[in-house]
Image: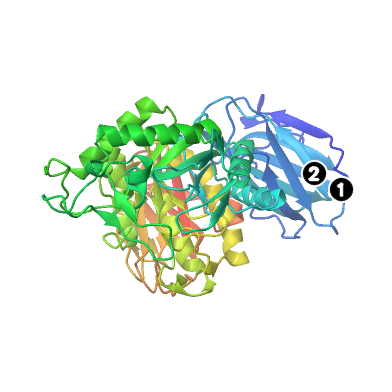
Amino acid sequence: MNSTLKIVRAKTAAVCAGLLVIPALLGGCFDSGSAKVDPRDAGDADMLVYVTTDKARYAPGEPVKFALTMNESAQRGELLVRYKHLDETIDEAKIEWDGSPTVHWEWQPSETDYQGYLTEIFVKQGKEMVDHANIAVDVSSDWGKFPRYGYLADFMAMEAAEQEAVIERLNRYRINGIQFYDWQWKHHKPLKLEGDAPAKQWPEIANRLVAYDTVKNYIDLAHGKSMKAMNYNLLFGAFDDSEQDGVKREWGMFKDPLLTNQDKHPLPESWASDILLLNPANEEWQSYLFEEEKKVFEHLPFDGWHVDQLGDRGVLYDANADKINLPDTYESFMNAAKKEIDVDYVMNAVGQFGQANIAKTPVEFLYTEVWDAHPGYRNLKEIADQNYKYSKGALNTVFAAYMNYDHADSAGEFNTPGVLLTDAVIFASGGSHLELGENMLAKEYFPNRNLKMTEELQDALVSYYDFLTAYQNLLRDGATDKELESASAEGAELSDQPERGKVWAFAKEAQGRTVLHLINFTDAATLEWQDNKADQTEPNEIADAKVTVKADGKVKKAWMASPDYYGGSAVPLDFKQKDGEVALTLPKLKYWNMIVLEY
């Protein structure tokens, strides 16, 4: 039985001695930093078991519905709920909790579009705050503004409850778009039809069975959480038997000017076919594939098309023996596709191949599958910066970056430090990471499940994705690189590049603030993000590092937030400013801290 709630809400509406008045919650006056409710002081009584919201993304004006599961042994008390944008409290509520195991309530955010919020929940018993949990909220009319992309790769017949659990898990990670990987029958005929209706099931390219009902139910479940469902397919793929289905050989791309060797992507003998490659700029091929994709969207309510490629194919020729400029064909194909099928588009740039061209097409964001040419942590930031320039600041970046790659050749576990350091770099650089689905990605073949996520990693990533969502306006909303001058620290050595034994420090300008990112490589075993052998080491916590950084003007406020502490809650920092420099003490640093200076 759900708790019967009495919720007292308080908007910041009055001023008392220069402080905000929220009398319904705490009585009297307290400052906008809500110092009386500090996440650093909250206990860890394990009373708050699980908190979620009904959706991963909300339209402006849409209410947010929360569900909080309490520990069975928890006693009644008060729940204090604080809604924050960045470090500012914008709304608060008190919930009289009667001890029931599940608590539900709603919150009405501002109608301002493209905002990230952090909801802080405290349990109060007597005068003590005995427990604390957080969850982020994204209010955005378009998922492509702040993409948090996940995947699905298993579509066999399954129970509805199993599917619901998968989508609920992705919802808690705040995933707002899902790539449906290898759901299709044949690349040139993605949906198998029997007459005018979809077949009940079909084999995909690896000969695993796909059930129509599973695909359709997953799409419906995703929509129920305000997630977009993206139909995966190559832009130039066909099976060996495609000529029987009307595909013409002269539409192909060839390795020689005599047209004797059509380019293809070889696959294991046990699979249904190799993949023959067609010329994306060939208008007859475009018309053929677009008609097949229209059948997909007619029978399955996908929101868009995740368009894949295979990277640099070397010198290629068309049917006239003319050389093909492959990246140019991407523009032709994508612009024609959007005109013919008006849905959302995402296109993979394998190793950044063709990304400058893709950025000119109608894609929701830029998607980079990272390979050996970009092995270092610094390369991840370079890609994000490059994509920002390609799109003139209009598009954010999603990385398909496969963790513990070699380690995944056999059964084992993902290495938590490797994953968290890579996510820290990607998120701080303004990107997000395609990694979460039914499992977690270790290979470009998404169904590979050799590695499992530990409970420690699962819990940590909840905090990391809450952090990415709550602070999206500082991380991904037009943040630009800022030269970091005179940055130094006592208790840690700073570097403007990732270096073993040092803390990587770089700055961004965002929303009129200086945002300093500190990523801890002091104990790193490697500076390669993939952590191939799963031997990246956990960093030792750095405590009370005294950081000095040059400021642009008079600093009015300094604060920090980290996904590694307090569920990502912002905490104020004492500071001193002299001769254009700000000195402050960082309480602790594990993997990644974000320091914000406000003027």
Few, some or many residues within 10 Å of mark 2 (<14, 14–19, 20+): many
Q: How is the image coloured?
A: rainbow
Q: Check disc 2 and report its element: helix, strand or loop.
A: strand
**Foreground: 409 or 266?**
266
Q: Check disc 1 and report its element: helix, strand or loop.
A: loop
- Indicate left or right for 402 with 352 as reference: right
The residue lying at 34 percent from left, 70 percent from top is 500
x and y, in percent, of residue 131 in the image: 73, 55
**Foreground: 545 or 406?**
406
- Indicate left or right for 314 with 541 as reference: left
Amino acid beneath label 2: Val
- Residue 560 seen in render: no
x and y, in percent, of residue 363 in the image: 37, 35
Residue at label 1? 100
The residue lying at 11 percent from left, 50 percent from top is 258
Quarter of the view holding residue 318: top left
Residue at label 2? 103
**Foreground: 527 or 16?**
527
Q: What number is the disc on residue 456?
A: none
Locate the C terminus by quadrant: top left
Residues under labels 1 and 2: Cα distance?
Answer: 7 Å
Quarter of the view holding residue 545: bottom left
x and y, in percent, of residue 146 in the image: 47, 39
x and y, in percent, of residue 386 in the image: 27, 45
- Residue 298 seen in render: yes
Locate the N terminus by quadrant: top right
- Indicate left or right for 549 with 450 as reference: left
Amino acid beneath label 1: Ser
